[in-house]
Image: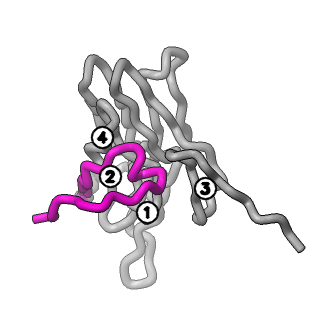
Amino acid sequence: MADAVRLDEQFAIITEAERSASPPRVLKHGDTFGVFDLRGDIVAMESGEQGLYHAGTRFLSRFELLLGRCRPLLLSSTISEDNTILAVDLTNPDVVRDNRVVVPRGALHVFRARLLWDGHCLERIRLSNHALHAIQFPIALRFDSDFADVFEVRGTRRTHRGRRQ
């Protein structure tokens, strides 16, 4: 019979969700830090730790870049040595209409550079067309906020919480 595990710590970190196989990208400067996926997105997941935090509160709980309705394909993702800049290279997947590829994978290059500095998060998105013709492509940014404190994100339940409007 297995022994019972007893946790007496007030802020123990307990999770039932599996972590992603890929390591998160983490930026930090002062009281501000961000936890992103390899594409530089904050993917909204129940009990997810990804987000943009300042002074212990998560200000962004979702921030996704979409090409059309699809997430772009990852080419590379790096963080500066001082953990303040995230640089991500992405490209488009094949776009198919009427069983025909109208925009081949790799025709668009998307470069994202995100900087945390002095309580601010700045992002530059640069698009380059490598096709031999003009491409019209909708680009969307989906974002959301829950203003959860870091202990809530880690699983602590609050007795009272504000209403979302």
Residue occupied by mark 2: 61
Label 3 residue SS: loop
Question: Residues under labels 4 and 3: Cα distance?
Answer: 22 Å
Q: Which class describes the residues within 10 Å of circle 3: few (<14), some (14-19), or many (20+)?
A: few
Q: Amino acid at mark 4?
A: Thr
Label 4 residue SS: strand
Q: Which residues are magenta?
A: 138-165
Residues at discs 1 and 4 in contact (Cβ within 8 Å) = no
Among numbered discs 3 and 2, the one appearing first in the sequence: 3
Please name the residue shown 38% across and 68% down the image.
102
**Residue 41 seen from this side:** no
Q: Which class describes the residues within 10 Å of circle 4: few (<14), some (14-19), or many (20+)?
A: some
Please name the residue shown 61% across and 56% down the image.
19
Whether 47 is drawn above or below 124: the answer is below
Q: Using the image as rendered, state which of residue 123 and residue 132 is in the foreground.
A: 123
Question: Which dot, 4 or 3, sits closer to the camera?
Answer: 4
> Does residue 21 belong to the magenta stretch?
no
Among numbered discs 4 and 3, the one appearing first in the sequence: 3
Q: Which class describes the residues within 10 Å of circle 1: few (<14), some (14-19), or many (20+)?
A: few
Whether 2 is drawn above or below 29: the answer is below
Label 2 residue SS: loop
Residue occupied by mark 4: 57
Residue occupied by mark 3: 20
Among numbered discs 2 and 1, the one appearing first in the sequence: 1
Question: Residues under labels 2 and 4: Cα distance?
Answer: 10 Å
Q: Using the image as rendered, state which of residue 53 and residue 87 is in the foreground.
A: 53
Label 1 residue SS: loop
